[in-house]
Every structure is written in structure tokens, then in C-alpha cells.
Amino acid sequence: MSESLRRLLFSQGKKIMKTDNLHLDQRGLRRIQRREWLKMLPLAALGAIAVPSVNEKLIKRGLALSDRASETFFRRQQLAPTFSDREVTAFDKFPINSYSTYDAEADLANWKLIVEGMVARPGEYTLEQIKALPKQVQNVKHICIEGWNVIGNFGGARLADFLQLVGADPQARFVEFTCLDDYFTSYDIASCQHPQTLLCYEMYGQPLTKEHGAPLRIHTPIKLGYKSAKHLFTLRVSNVLSRETGFWEDQGYSWYGGI
């Protein structure tokens, strides 16, 4: 606690311990009315927040509460808004966010998505196998935690259809992805089964560029942008999350990341 905050608490305490300008002795202090002590609670809370370790715990508890609330109110069939072609942001105006300088070129020729965990048919899946699933094209918002948002055109297979293809266990709770650029993230199974959550291989009618996550990325308008992982490499279906839940999530971002 800072010295200035200590002095503030001390001065406020002195005010409360005065009645008609008469200081209370220790015996009188024990009899002070409960509502007088309640006046101290906001300052005590401020003091707690000023302590870094307490502050971090409060933030984590707040994020966990927010995640639980988002998951509770989530409805699998409730769709995010969609938009007309004329409302779509021009492709060259779509911002590119990347946390690394990874170049996907060397990994594209022999790329396969490795599937493991609670699935009946683990193994390696080609882009052609994913493209053989029913294709969905949607104009939806991409909302970044940094404060900007755009409307983009995305095409691909529903992740729900792919999970059915690989025989995901109905009792599974999570899906975890790692990426070619060492990014990683994880999702609740219900969000993965949402009809607008895509294994996206196209934007604006063209194959994904390297900058936008070639050859395959997640895109889902029901979560913030950092949950739309690029350059997918492995998919793991599980009942228990790994100790590391996501690149940004492990640094304090919301795990659920819902909108």
C-alpha cells in the first residue's frame, strides 16, 4: 500500500473516531456504531486494489466470472449478424495482425492438419478432405480486442462438420489448436459446434493469403479476433484443458473471448 494511501486511511479513521469533537478511548472505540466502520470499506477496497498481487487476483476472478456468464448465456443456434456484399470492407482495408514474422511458404506444400485426442478417427487430414465438406460463405464482423472491427467475407467448412468427420467424442468439452507459427488457443466445444464457426480456407472468394493465415484458420464471429487462430497445425479434442490455454489467454486475456 502506498504511503499516501496510508495517510488517507489514517486521517479518515481519525474523523470516524471523533464524536462531538471528543476522541473515543479504546473501550468506546469498541462500541462505535457499525455504520461508521462501513464508511471505511471503500477506502479498504481501494487499498486492496492498490496492492499488485491482490489486483491481479481480482482481475483474474473478474475474467473468470465474465467467462462463466458468457458461456451460460451462449446459445448454439443464435447467429451473429450477417451483412450484404456491398457492406463488406474492401480486402486491402482489412487489417492484418500478427504476433510473429512467420512465413508460411515453406510449410504449405506438404501441409496436413494433425487430429488427436478424443476422436474416433485420429490422423492427418489434407486441405482437400476439408474442402470436400459442405462449404459455407458468410459476411460477418471481425472484432479486434484493440478496438477496431471490419466486415469480412469468409469461406470454409463448418468446424462442427469436421468434428463429426473425425468422430469427436460427444462427451468432449474442449478443442485445442496449435499453429505453424507457434500460436495456440483453445475453445469450448459448444462454440466449435456453432454454425458460423469455420475452418476457413478462403477470404473474398480466394485462397487464404499467408498474411491471413494460409492454408487454414479458424474464423468465428461469436468471439474476439485473437480467438480466430491462423496457420492451423494440430487439433486436439479433450475433456481437460492443457495447462497452457492460449498465447494471449495465458497473458491475461479472457479465455472464452465471447462477443
Image: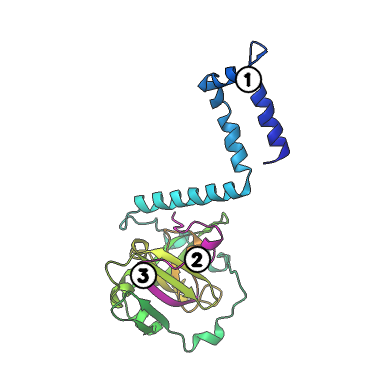
The residue indicated by pointer 3 is: 238
| Residue 257 located within the stretch drawn in magenta | yes
* Residue 251 image position (x, y, % from top left): 56, 61
Q: Which residues are magenta?
A: 231-259
Q: Residue at x 49, y 89 (%)?
A: 109
Residue 221 sits in quarter: bottom left
Residue 194 sits in quarter: bottom left
Q: Looking at the image, is mark 2 or mark 1 earlier in the sequence? A: 1
Q: As drawn, is 63 to the left or to the right of 53?
A: left
Amino acid at dot 3:
Ser
Amino acid at dot 2:
Gly
The disc at residue 17 is 1
Q: Residue at x 49, y 48 (%)?
A: 62
Q: In the rendered image of this protein, does residue 110 appear above or below residue 229?
A: below
The N terminus lies in quadrant: top right
Question: What element does badge 1 sit on?
Answer: loop
Amino acid at dot 1:
Met
Q: In the rendered image of this protein, does residue 126 appear above or below residue 35?
A: below
- Farthest residue toward the bottom? 110
Q: As drawn, is 240 to the left or to the right of 206?
A: left
Q: As drawn, is 47 to the left or to the right of 86?
A: right
* Residue 189 image position (x, y, % from top left): 35, 64
Q: Nearer the viewer, mark 2 or mark 1?
A: 1
Q: In the rendered image of this protein, does residue 21 appear above or below residue 8?
A: above
The disc at residue 246 is 2
Q: Residue at x 38, y 84 (%)?
A: 124
Asked if marks 2 and 1 touch (Cβ < 8 Å), the reply is no
Q: Nearer the viewer, mark 1 or mark 3?
A: 1
